[in-house]
Image (spheres, rainbow, N blue to C red):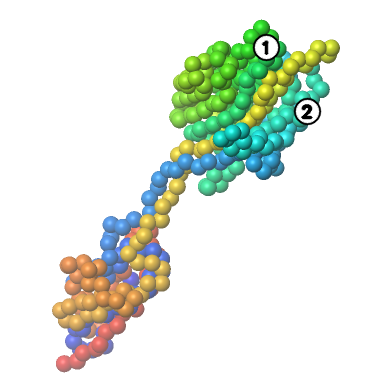
C-alpha cells in the first residue's frame, strides 16, 4: 500500500515505477475508483512432477569403488544354517570374442575359511536422491550376470538381495546349484522372509543369470531371463507394509567342507542397476516478471501505457485498466501481486494541478 499526497487543487493521474523483487505473474494497483492490472494473475510459480532416478549404475569398468563394502551385506542363508560371507572379490576385464566387445565383471579371489556355503559379498547403501533422501518405496533393480554350470560336478550359489535401513530383507533372487547329478541351476525369488517362487533351469546352456525386480505400491514383479526355453518368466506378488529399500547386496559362494573339494560353477556380475521410481520434483515455471525487472506505467487523464525494461508492452495491460486519479489531499493505493511473489517496490509520480 502506498499513500499519495496531492498538494494541488485539482485531481491528477498517477504514473508508477515498479521494480520486481522476485518472480511474479502480475502487478495490480487499486484505489477506490480505478484499477490497473499488468501481467497474468493466473500464473503459478511452478509445478510438481515425478521422475525416476538411477541411483546405482555399476559396470565395474573402474574396479570396485569405495561405495561397495566387502562382506557387510545381507545373504539369505543364516550363519547358523551354514551360509557365510568371507573371502575377497575384485574385477576383471574380459576381452572381446570375434565380433564382440570388451566388458568388465566381478571376480572372486578368495572364498573364506568357513565350512558350508561361503564366499564374498558386496554391499552398497543407496546414495541420496536429488532431494537428499535415502531409500526408495517404488523402485526397479536389474542384474546382468552369470550363474551357469559347465560340468555336472560344478556347484555354486549367487544372490542379489535388497534390504531396508535396519538390514531386514525386502526382496531378492537366488541362483543355486547344489547337486552333482546334472547341470541344472535352481532359481528362487524371495519377498521379505518368504520364498514366493522357484524353478529349475533345465536349459543350462542358455542360462545367463539375468533378473529384474520391480516394486510399485504393494506389487512386486520379478522377471527371470533366459529360463528353460530361452524366454523370460514373470512372477507377480502382492505384499503390504513393506519398508523402503536402502541397500543392495551381491553375494556368490561355493560349498566347502574339510576333506572334500567341490568344483565351482562360473559366477559373476557384469551390470547392476538400481532405479528409484517417482521421485518428487519441482519445475520452476517461467513468469511474466523476473527479479529486477523494471515496469513503468505512464498515465494521463484517459490512457495508460506500460513499459517493461523500457520496451512498450501494451499486450500485458488488462483491457479493463484505467488511469488512477489522485484527488487533492491524501489518497491510498493498494498493491497486489501473485501469491508466491514478494511485494514489488513501487514509486508513484504525479504532476500537481491548480485551478
Q: Which residue lies under the disc numbered 1?
A: 152
Image quadrant in which the C terminus is located: bottom left
Task: Answer above or below: position of 203 versus 112.
Answer: above
Q: Residue furthest bottom?
A: 355
Label 1: which secondary element: loop
Q: Residue at x 19, y 82 (%)?
A: 300
Q: Which residue lies under the disc numbered 2?
A: 110
Foreground label between 1 and 2: 1
* Image location of residue 269, percent across then percent down: 63, 30
Task: Answer above or below: position of 90 versus 178.
Answer: below
> Pointer 2: residues within 10 angstroms few (<14), some, or many (20+)?
some
Q: Residue at x 61, y 25 (%)?
A: 146
Label 2: which secondary element: strand
Residue 125 found in image quarter: top right
* Image location of residue 53, percent across then percent down: 50, 42
Depth order, front residue of 136/304: 136
Amino acid at each position: 500500500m502506498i499513500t499519495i499526497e496531492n498538494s494541488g487543487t485539482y485531481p491528477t493521474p498517477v504514473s508508477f515505477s515498479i521494480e520486481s523483487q522476485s518472480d511474479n505473474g502480475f502487478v495490480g494497483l487499486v484505489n477506490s475508483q480505478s484499477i490497473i492490472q499488468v501481467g497474468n494473475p493466473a500464473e503459478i510459480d511452478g509445478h510438481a512432477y515425478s521422475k525416476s532416478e538411477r541411483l546405482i549404475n555399476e559396470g565395474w569398468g573402474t574396479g570396485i569403488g569405495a561405495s561397495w563394502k566387502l562382506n557387510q551385506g545381507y545373504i539369505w542363508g543364516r550363519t547358523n544354517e551354514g551360509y557365510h560371507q568371507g573371502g575377497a572379490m575384485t574385477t576383471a576385464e574380459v576381452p572381446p570374442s570375434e565380433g564382440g566387445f570388451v566388458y568388465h565383471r566381478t571376480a572372486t579371489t578368495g572364498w573364506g575359511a568357513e565350512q558350508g556355503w561361503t564366499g564374498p559379498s558386496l554391499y552398497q547403501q543407496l546414495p541420496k536422491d536429488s532431494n537428499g533422501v535415502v531409500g526408495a518405496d517404488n523402485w526397479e533393480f536389474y542384474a546382468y550376470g552369470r550363474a551357469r554350470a559347465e560340468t555336472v560336478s560344478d556347484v555354486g550359489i549367487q544372490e542379489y538381495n535388497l534390504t531396508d535401513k535396519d538390514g531386514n530383507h525386502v526382496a531378492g533372487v537366488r541362483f543355486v546349484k547344489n547337486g552333482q547329478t546334472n547341470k541344472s541351476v535352481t532359481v528362487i525369488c524371495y519377498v521379505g522372509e518368504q520364498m514366493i517362487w522357484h524353478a529349475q533351469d533345465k536349459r543350462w546352456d542358455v542360462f545367463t543369470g539375468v533378473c529384474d525386480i520391480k516394486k510399485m505400491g504393494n506389487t512386486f514383479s520379478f522377471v527371470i531371463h533366459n529360463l528353460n526355453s530361452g524366454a523370460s518368466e514373470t512372477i507377480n506378488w502382492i505384499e503390504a507394509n513393506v519398508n523402503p529399500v536402502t541397500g543392495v547386496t551381491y553375494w556368490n559362494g561355493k560349498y566347502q567342507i574339510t576333506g572334500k573339494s567341490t568344483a565351482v560353477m562360473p559366477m559373476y556380475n557384469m551390470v547392476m542397476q538400481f532405479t528409484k521410481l517417482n521421485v518428487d520434483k519441482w519445475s520452476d515455471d517461467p513468469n511474466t516478471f523476473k527479479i529486477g525487472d523494471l515496469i513503468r506505467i505512464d498515465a494521463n487523464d484517459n490512457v495508460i501505457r506500460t513499459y517493461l525494461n523500457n520496451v512498450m508492452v501494451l499486450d500485458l495491460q488488462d483491457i479493463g485498466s484505467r488511469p488512477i486519479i489522485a484527488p487533492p489531499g491524501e489518497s491510498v493505493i493498494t498493491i497486489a501481486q501473485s501469491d508466491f511473489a514478494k511485494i514489488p517496490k513501487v514509486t508513484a509520480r504525479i504532476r500537481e494541478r491548480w485551478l
